[in-house]
Amino acid sequence: MSSSSRQSSRRANRLLSALQPDDFAHLEPHLEWVELKKDTVLYETNEGMPFVYFPHEAVVSLMTALPDGRTVETAVLGWEAMVGSASTLVTRQSLGRYVVQTPGSASRIDAGVLHRAFEERLSLRDPLLRYEAALLAEALQTMACTIAHDVEARCCRWLLTMRDRADQASLPFTHEHLSRMLGVQRSTVSLVTCGLQSTGLIRQRRGAITVTDGSGLEQIACGCYAVARQRSWQL
C-alpha cells in the first residue's frame, strides 16, 4: 500500500485514527487496501481468521446461528470498527459469521502481526480493548432488543444503524435480507416496511430501501438505537 493510501486508511477508519501516531506507524507498512463485495462471507463461525479488517465504506454484520437454523445479527461493523478483533486477539477463531452488507473499501492486516503488536505495545492495547468492550456491549444490547422490543421498533433501529454505518440514506437491502437480519418472517418485514413507507419514513424500490425521515424513524425505534449510537461516539 502506498503512503497516501495508508494515510487515507487512517482517515477513513475511526479506530485507526484513534491510535497513537507511533502505533499507527508501526502497523501501517502491513496494511493492505482491499475492496469488499456485498454478501461476501469473510469468516464462518469457528473458522480461522488470518486477517483483521478495518472498514472504510464497507459495512459488515456479525451473525449468530440459532439452534432452529435461523441466524440473527448481533453487531454491525462499519467505519468506526474492526472485523475479527476479539477472535484474533484471544481465540484466533471466528466467534460468528461475518457477512459484508454494504460493499466498499477496507484496510486489512495479518492477524498475527496485529496480535504481536498488541502483546508488545502497551499504548496499542487501550484503544483496542475499549473497542472490544463497546462491541460486547452492542452485542448484548442487540440480544436484549431482540427479546424485549417489537419488530417495528427493531426494524427502525436497524435501518438507522445501517444508515449511520454506511453514511448514506439509500440501503441496498431486500425484505428477504432484512428478515434474516431481524430473525423474523419475510411477510412480517413486508408488513412493517409498507407501514413505514405509507407514513413517509422510508421509500422502497426493488432491492433497496431509502431512509427519507430519520427523525421519524427515531421516534418509533426503541431506545437501544440512541444508547448504541452514544456508546459508539464515546469510543
Image (cartoon, helix red, strand yellow):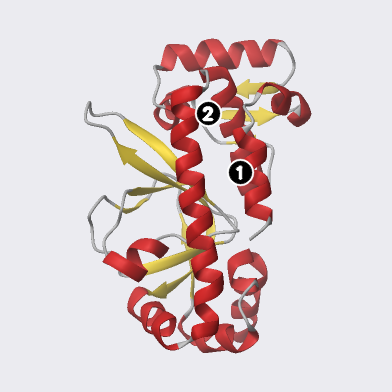
Residue located at (56% from left, 71% from top): 127
Query: Looking at the rendered structure, which numbered label has been put on residue 60?
Result: none
What's the CA distance linking mark 1 and mark 2? 27 Å
State if disc 2 and disc 1 touch (CB < 8 Å).
no
Residue located at (49% from left, 23% from top): 148
Name the residue type under label 2.
Gly
The residue nearer to you, when weighing 66 against 119, is 119
The residue nearer to you, when weighing 73 against 223, is 223
Q: Which x, y percent locates residue 44?
A: 27, 51
Q: Which x, y percent locates residue 51?
A: 36, 69
Is residue 222 positioned above or below 129 on the image? above
Could you classify mark 1 by the number of other residues whose Cα lies within 10 Å: few (under 14), some (14-19), or many (20 or more)?
many
Query: Which quarter of the image is occupied by the C terminus?
Result: bottom right
Residue 98 visible in the current orientation: yes
Q: Which x, y percent locates residue 229?
A: 65, 45
The residue nearer to you, when weighing 24 against 176, is 24
Could you classify mark 2 by the number of other residues whose Cα lies within 10 Å: few (under 14), some (14-19), or many (20 or more)?
few
Residue located at (45% from left, 83% from top): 30
Q: How many marks?
A: 2
Query: Looking at the rendered structure, which numbered label has been put on residue 228?
Result: 1
Quarter where residue 153 is shown:
top right
Name the residue type under label 1.
Ala
The residue nearer to you, when weighing 14 against 201, is 14
Which residue position is annotated with label 2? 207
Counting residues from the start of the chain, the first of labels 1 and 2 encountered is 2
Is residue 119 positioned above or below 226 on the image? below
Q: Which x, y percent locates residue 67?
A: 22, 30
Residue 102 visible in the current orientation: no
Residue located at (63% from left, 10% from top): 195
Q: Secondary structure at mark 1?
A: helix
Please state if 94 lies on the left or on the right of 58 as rendered: left
Q: Secondary structure at mark 2?
A: loop
